[in-house]
Amino acid sequence: MKHIAVIGAGTMGNGIAHVFAQFGHQVNLIDISQTALDSAIATIGKNLDRQVSKGTLTEAQKSTTLNNLITHTDMKSGVQGVSLVVEAATENIDLKLKIFKDLDMLTDPTVILATNTSSISITQIAAVTTRPEKVIGMHFMNPVPIMKLVEIIRGYSTSNEVTNTIMELSKRLNKIPVEVNDYPGFVANRILMPMINEAIYSLYEGVAGVEEIDTVMKLGMAHPMGPLQLADFIGLDVCLAILNVLYDGFGNPKYAPCPLLVNMVMAGKKGVKSGEGFYTWNQGTKELLVAPKFK
């Protein structure tokens, strides 16, 4: 597992690449956009600088980490010679299935194919490959360099050998892996997303305002941030996509996304990534956004 590939240079992809590179792995970071790759390397550099300033990393370790990263805009060249691929592309089922079909053709049959999906069925993804026993979920939490948890999701056909390998690899990244089975939302989002959805319903139904809802959960439940602020960080479009996976997977109306969430996403209010969601965001500064009036 010395040489790995990470597909997707967004927030999760660059965080995953950062961690693997920091722990001595050669990492091929792959994205169709060179601009996205350049931005990812810049972000990793800034995050490494933050670690150096806190004394958790030396300048020499920072340099070694950056030297372990190579960017590619071509998947074929990016996956040559690797032992593991971690896909961290957009949470879109059609895109992920296409990527895994391509990976199945472009990589050696011994290569383990992992996905960072937060909700999409591992079994469904594995079914488009000729090696379902080597397909597994490796769901990192955001921000990846800081958060300890990795959800390790076994598909229906994932082998014990592959599961054990990925569990041990996660520990060597100084993470705490937790093995779960392949059901919609796994554990993290099956529990988290209904809570966020209920918080949005509380706003939608006029129970309380944005700040009040978040304050109750922070002070009353000891959450580090409120569910509406967290939704902004995750991305309201991502929250909606995960809720739709839960609703489709279980067929239970309790997972149906709140109409307010649907409307906000359609209106382009996606949280931090768009600069506006339940809060307004400006260079990391949070300013309360007046609660949306439409329903």
Image (cartoon, helix red, strand yellow):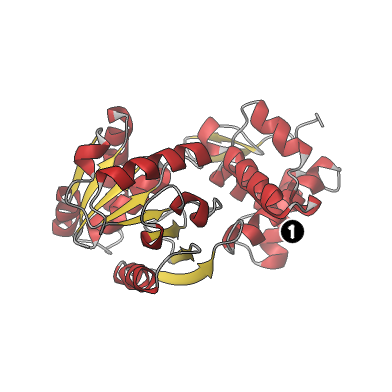
The mark total stands at 1
Q: Position of residue 287 (x, y in %)?
A: 61, 38
Which one is nearer the viewer's eye here, 143 or 240?
A: 240
- Say what amino acid the circle numbered 1 marks: Val
Which one is nearer the viewer's eye here, 142 or 86?
A: 86
Relative to 48, is 281 on the left or the right?
right
At x 50%, y 56%, the residue is 123
Most extreme residue toward the front is: 130
Q: Is residue 175 above or below residue 15?
A: below
Q: Position of residue 183 (x, y in %)?
A: 60, 61
Residue that badge 1 annotates = 216
Most extreme residue toward the top is: 267
- Quadrant, the C terminus: top right
At x 69%, y 63%, the residue is 219
Q: Is residue 187 above or below residue 29?
A: below
Q: Position of residue 93 (x, y in %)?
A: 52, 41
Q: Is residue 287 above or below residue 69?
A: above
Around disc 1, counting alpha carbons within 10 Å, would you say few (fewer than 14), some (14 to 19), or many (20 or more)? Answer: some
- Quadrant, the N terminus: bottom left
As helix, strand or loop, the secondary structure at mark 1 comes to helix
At x 26%, y 43%, the residue is 106
Residue 8 in sight here: no
At x 42%, y 71%, the residue is 176
Relative to 249, is 43 on the left or the right?
left
Q: Position of residue 87 (x, y in %)?
A: 38, 48
Residue 248 in sight here: yes
Which one is nearer the viewer's eye here, 42 or 187?
A: 187
